[in-house]
Image: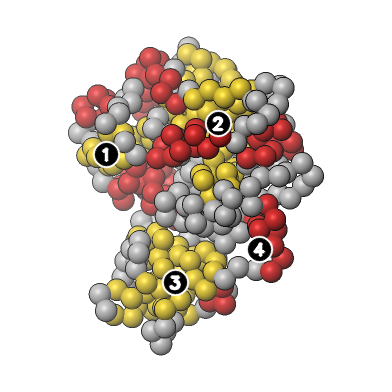
Amino acid sequence: MKTTAFTEIHTSLGAKMSEFAGYWMPIEYSGIIEEHLAVCRGVGVFDVSHMGEIWVEGPHALDFLQQVTSNDVSALAEGRAQYSCIPNESGGIVDDIVVYNYCGSVYVLVVNAANIEKDWAWLKSHNPMGATLANESDRTAQLAVQGPMATRVLQRLTKENLSAMPTYSFVAGDLADREVIISHTGYTGAGGFELYFYPADGPHIWNAIFEAGDPEGIRPVGLGARDTLRLEMGYCLYGNELDDTTSPIEAGLGWITKFTDGKNFPSRALLERQVQEGTERKLCAFEMEEKAIPRHGYELVTRDGDWIGTVTSGSVSPLTRKGIGLGYVRSEYAALGTEIAVLIRERLLKARVVKLPFRHLP
């Protein structure tokens, strides 16, 4: 298994470690609920160095990205980022990604850890215009500093005006006297930043962040709480809500699927037809009305027990203490307020389709 620049730090802190996407990663330190609440109320640090970074550059970089990604990269200003996906020929999703317009004709794609090799092969095989590609995943470390106190903590370490950064913007500058890319994005819904830097600088940056955040009670946070945080916001997870068979339209990602001039990604015509005619199934959010925990793979049914879909992600919300989940259902059952049920150990337990996010922070 691969390790990151922080693996020894995780083990020294007593983290519960496990394999994830080929990496030896921390799942939790003091407990998922405690870490989840620390991010919602204060500030926490995630090691997300397992994520992939693929650089795209050259005079044909923009044309290339317009052919392989769903969002409109031509609308992406320098210093800004956008959520997007890589559609395949059958309308499914190779991966969901974040595209950064680094400068001029230089872009960075941040991809999911489990899909690095698949994405790399796909991009190379769909590059007839000859854009220059470089897989820098093994030479890039990443920390996510998340929570309402993240700005206050990181501002002590950099001269960049973090409070003035719009969401989905980034700057290349110094933090703790090291070169970093500071990105105002996040997968928790609690606010914060992602930091990209050379792995050799990892321990220095980690120690500087935790020293700066000591007054705020900064905490290390594992991937377990990262998952419950994204679920409370209703964010999709590749391998659960998204895969090679799910379309962005079914997944509610029509807002990142653009059909502007010059966008000729695979399955464009199919996805346009789905927008116009609708889809047989849709991703919905639901909340349990009885005490129960929905889990990935459980059946979603009508209150009479007829099958209508499948749970893709489920847990108990650490904030509301209610069972929550995401799942694909037949489209006629995806309307807000629809009464459904989850089949759990041969029992039909009541649930209701609700509006996202599950979590509302002050």
Q: Secondary structure at mark 4?
A: helix
Q: Secondary structure at mark 2?
A: helix
Q: Residue at x 54, y 40 (%)?
A: 97
Q: Mark 4 — residue?
A: 274
Q: Which mark is residue 309?
A: 3
> Badges 3 and 1: C-beta atoms under 8 Å apart?
no
Counting from the top left corner in percent of width and height, residue 106 is at 65, 23
Marks 4 and 1, how far apart at CA: 37 Å
Quadrant holding the N terminus: top left
Counting from the top left corner in percent of width and height, residue 121 is at 49, 34
Counting from the top left corner in percent of width and height, residue 270 is at 66, 58
Marks 3 and 2, how far apart at CA: 36 Å
Q: Earlier in the sequence, mark 3 or mark 2?
A: 2
Q: Which mark is residue 124?
A: 2
Whether residue 192 is visible here, answered yes or no, is no
Q: Is residue 245 above or below residue 159?
A: below
Q: Residues within 10 Å of mark 3 (few under 14, many from 20)?
A: many
Q: Residue furthest bottom?
A: 304
Q: Residues within 10 Å of mark 1 (few under 14, many from 20)?
A: few
Q: Residues within 10 Å of mark 4 (few under 14, many from 20)?
A: some
Q: Mark 1 — residue?
A: 19
> Badges 2 and 1: C-beta atoms under 8 Å apart?
no
Q: Amino acid at mark 2?
A: Lys
Q: Amino acid at mark 4?
A: Gln
Marks 2 and 1, how far apart at CA: 28 Å
- How many labels were placed on the picture? 4
